[in-house]
Image (cartoon, rainbow, N blue to C red):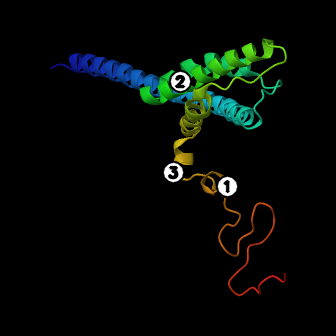
Amino acid sequence: MTSTTVTVLVGLGGLVLGALTSGCVQAWLGWLDRRRTGRAAARLLYTYLLWAELAVNDALTLRSWNPKTPWDWFIAAWREQRLALAHVLPTESFRELAVAFGVIEQLAVIRAEDCKRTPPTFSSDPRFEGTYRADVKKAVAVVHLASLTWRERRNPPNEMTADPASSRSEEGRVLPSGEATPTEDAPPPNN
């Protein structure tokens, strides 16, 4: 082989390798961008789902609809963010979210019909207490998990791992409320 042939082959090899490397880098950057967009969409829907879950629980507890709950906002947020989530969620998780937002849409229709009556009433669909509440609660868990980065999944912040029902953390630590927990050698409180 002559030096000209070697130069041409090295040049062509470099061109092919550069094109492959560039394609791989672009694909990886696109994947990262879709993940970031999906995580942002999940965070937004997480806040809406928490709000919807509170609204459902309040409606069941009080047996009346809160007129200030914007049921249409929940549906609009879902329609705006669902494509970004479809790129990053597994099929089953996405299905659970779609079911939950379908439930929220059904509740918005039920609420609108109840508010048309004089006086406004509260229709208790038998699915409302069981299935509807469970679907929304399941979707909250799915979208919360989707909103976490891999670092947050590996090392969750204390607020996420702490049991909210528990009033005490480890002994000798300061609680979020500012009160200190007792240590083993601390005297018992005077009652």
10 Å crowding of disc 3: few (<14), some (14-19), many (20+) = few
Q: Residue at x 54, y 22 (%)?
A: 98
Q: Nearer the viewer, mark 1 or mark 3?
A: 1
Q: Earlier in the sequence, mark 3 or mark 2?
A: 2
Compute the Cα span from label 3 to label 2.
Answer: 28 Å
Front in this rendered view, residue 34 or 107? 107
10 Å crowding of disc 1: few (<14), some (14-19), many (20+) = few
Compute the Cα span from label 1 to label 3.
Answer: 20 Å
Of the numbered discs in the image, which one, if any, rests on residue 154?
Answer: 3
Front in this rendered view, residue 29 or 15? 29
Q: Name the residue furthest left.
A: 1
Compute the Cα span from label 2 to label 1.
Answer: 27 Å
10 Å crowding of disc 2: few (<14), some (14-19), many (20+) = some
Q: Amino acid at mark 2?
A: Val
Q: Quadrant of residue 18?
A: top left
Residue at image mark 1: 164
Could you tell me which quadrant the N terminus lies in?
top left
Q: Is residue 54 visible?
A: yes
Q: Earlier in the sequence, mark 2 or mark 1?
A: 2
Residue at image mark 2: 99
Q: How many marks?
A: 3
Q: Secondary structure at mark 1?
A: loop
Q: Nearer the viewer, mark 3 or mark 2?
A: 2
Q: Amino acid at mark 3?
A: Arg
Of the numbered discs in the image, which one, if any, rests on residue 27?
Answer: none
Task: Give percent across and percent down for residue 117.
Answer: 79, 13
Q: Is residue 77 visible?
A: no
Task: Give percent across and percent down for residue 124.
Answer: 67, 26
